Image (cartoon, grey):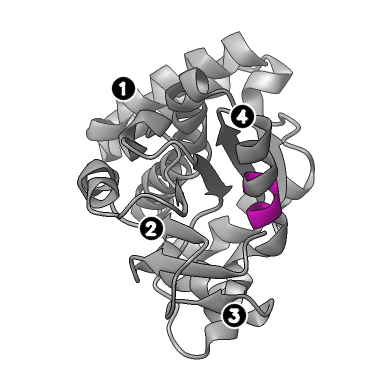
């Protein structure tokens, strides 16, 4: 049974996880741990793992890093919170609240490891789903599309509406409603209004030419995926 956890790393993810564990009554740091949880950059996981004495469970929270990075530890697993974390300061509860409503990919090589991973995910308030170790990079690419590239899209859209004299803040309710509406496709491509699409390209070419290729690529992808 896991009763004491040592969290290595106090960045965005590490501070949020440590705060949630304390909320749930788990002893964090101090004493001999049952689990060492690595919340460090992906490139530092292997070196950090090698510096941990064998014995406790060792786990990381990376989305793309394979379990082999935790060598030489045999008692190992991964829990990746499928959530974006910001630099929230202030009370621990604000950092921990970033976990609310999130899912988590859990990976383990044995049933015991998977059970430990699910326990940690649920203790953190996450909804666990099993992810094969060999599929981690593909899964993480999907997560990047959903989060990082959403930021890119907002910034591209903001450049266009601001060039037209409109406030970028006006885009936020539109984006939120698109998510709340189950990502139902609307707009000119959904209607087959190719005249409007071509007019968009011409207007972008004149005002923000650096975004024309991105618009065209996204339009083609939208047609393919609709």
What residue do we see at 44% from left, 63% from top?
A: 13
Q: Earlier in the sequence, mark 1 or mark 3?
A: 3
Q: Secondary structure at mark 1?
A: helix
Residue extending furthest front?
55
What residue do we see at 33% from left, 66% from top?
A: 9
- Mark 3 and mark 4: Cα distance apart in space: 27 Å
Q: In the rendered image, which residue does mark 2 sit on? A: 39
Determine the main secondary structure of the stretch shown in magenta. helix
Between circles 4 and 2, the one closer to the viewer is 4
Label 4 packing within 10 angstroms: few (<14), some (14-19), many (20+): few
Q: Which mark is residue 22?
A: 3
Q: Position of residue 36 (x, y in %)?
A: 43, 59
Q: Which residues are magenta?
A: 117-121
Q: Position of residue 27 (x, y in %)?
A: 56, 78
Q: In the rendered image, which residue does mark 1 sit on? A: 213
Q: Earlier in the sequence, mark 1 or mark 4?
A: 4
- Mark 2 and mark 1: Cα distance apart in space: 37 Å
Judging depth in this view, the residue of 219 and 79 nearest the camera is: 79
Residue 112 falls in image quadrant: top right
Q: Secondary structure at mark 3?
A: helix
Q: Quadrant of the N terminus?
A: bottom right
Q: Secondary structure at mark 2?
A: loop
- Mark 4 and mark 2: Cα distance apart in space: 22 Å
Q: In the rendered image, which residue does mark 4 sit on? A: 110
């Amino acid at each position: 049974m896991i009763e004491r956890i040592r969290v290595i790393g106090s960045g965005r993810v590490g501070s949020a996880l440590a705060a949630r564990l304390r909320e749930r009554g788990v002893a964090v740091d101090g004493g001999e741990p049952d689990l060492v949880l690595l919340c460090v950059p992906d490139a530092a996981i292997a070196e950090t793992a090698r510096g941990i004495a064998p014995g406790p469970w060792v786990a990381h929270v990376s989305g793309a890093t394979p379990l082999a990075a935790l060598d030489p530890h045999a008692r190992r697993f991964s829990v990746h919170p499928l959530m974006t974390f910001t630099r929230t300061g202030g009370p621990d509860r604000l950092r921990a609240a970033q976990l609310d409503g999130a899912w988590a990919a859990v990976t383990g090589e044995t049933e015991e490891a998977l059970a430990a991973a699910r326990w940690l995910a649920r203790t953190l308030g996450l909804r666990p789903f099993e992810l094969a170790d060999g599929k981690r990079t593909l899964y993480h690419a999907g997560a990047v599309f959903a989060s990082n590239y959403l930021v890119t899209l907002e910034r591209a859209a903001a450049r266009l509406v601001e060039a037209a004299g409109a406030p970028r803040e006006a885009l936020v309710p539109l984006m939120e409603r698109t998510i709340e509406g189950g990502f139902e496709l609307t707009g000119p491509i959904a209607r087959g209004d190719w005249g409007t699409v071509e007019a968009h390209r011409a207007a972008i070419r004149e005002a923000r030419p650096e975004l024309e290729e991105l618009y065209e690529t996204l339009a083609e992808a939208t047609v393919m995926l609709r």
